[in-house]
């Protein structure tokens, strides 16, 4: 089994703990740097490149949720899109997870 772990560069210590846990149950991992949309120019190009519909525009309520679209949410979305593209191009089943994921120690039978 393989996994892509999305993480911000400053979170290397946290991601290492998760990678160690995954390796202990024989899951191969690759790291994908998250899209950091905190920079205004990155955010503007991100919105344009993702063709974000007006209803998801920054600061507007989401269609199915009462929460507001934030730079963090858009960066997270873009990061997952990048992971999906990587999975699709490899044509290999993979888990996609973020660096703050936690799992129970007895999960390994379910990953086979």
Image: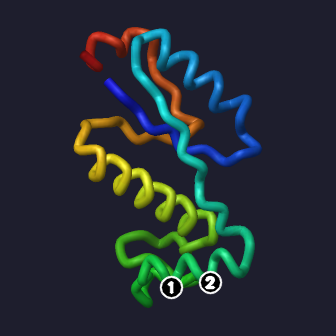
Q: Which residue is drawn at 49% across and 64% down?
A: 78
C-alpha gap between disc 1 and disc 2: 6 Å
Q: Is residue 88 above or below residue 22?
A: below
- Could you say which quadrant of the image residue 111 lies in? top left
**Circle 2 sits on which residue?**
44
| Mark 2: secondary structure | helix
Q: In which quarter of the image is the N terminus?
A: top left
User: Residue 45, how many percent across, how many down?
Assistant: 59, 81
**Label at residue 48:** 1
In the image, taking residue 90 as reference, residue 51 lies left or right, namely right
Q: Residue at x 36, y 15 (%)?
A: 107
User: Residue 11, how many percent across, how many down?
Assistant: 72, 39
Q: Is residue 104 above or below residue 72?
A: above
The residue lying toward the viewer, choosing from 99 and 2, is: 2
| Mark 1: secondary structure | helix
Q: Mark 2 packing: few (<14 Cα in 10 Å), some, or many (20+)?
A: few
Answer whether labels 1 and 2 touch (C-beta < 8 Å): yes
In the image, taking residue 85 as reference, residue 35 lies left or right, namely right
Q: Mark 1 packing: few (<14 Cα in 10 Å), some, or many (20+)?
A: few
In the image, taking residue 107 as reference, residue 15 lies left or right, namely right
- Could you say which quadrant of the image residue 6 lies in? top right
Q: Quadrant of the C terminus?
A: top left
Residue closest to the far bottom: 54
- Could you say which quadrant of the image residue 16 lies in? top right
Residue closest to the far front: 90
Q: Is residue 26 above or below residue 58?
A: above
């Amino acid at each position: 089994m393989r996994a892509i772990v999305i993480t911000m560069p400053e979170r290397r210590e946290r991601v290492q703990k998760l990678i160690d846990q995954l390796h202990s149950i024989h899951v191969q991992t690759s790291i994908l740097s998250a899209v950091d949309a905190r920079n205004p120019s990155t955010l503007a190009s991100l919105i344009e490149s993702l063709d974000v519909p007006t209803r998801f525009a920054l600061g507007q309520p989401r269609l199915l949720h009462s929460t507001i679209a934030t730079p963090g949410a858009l960066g997270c979305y873009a990061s997952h899109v990048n992971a999906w593209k990587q999975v699709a191009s490899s044509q290999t089943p993979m888990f996609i997870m973020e660096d703050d994921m936690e799992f129970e120690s007895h999960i390994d039978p379910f990953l086979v």
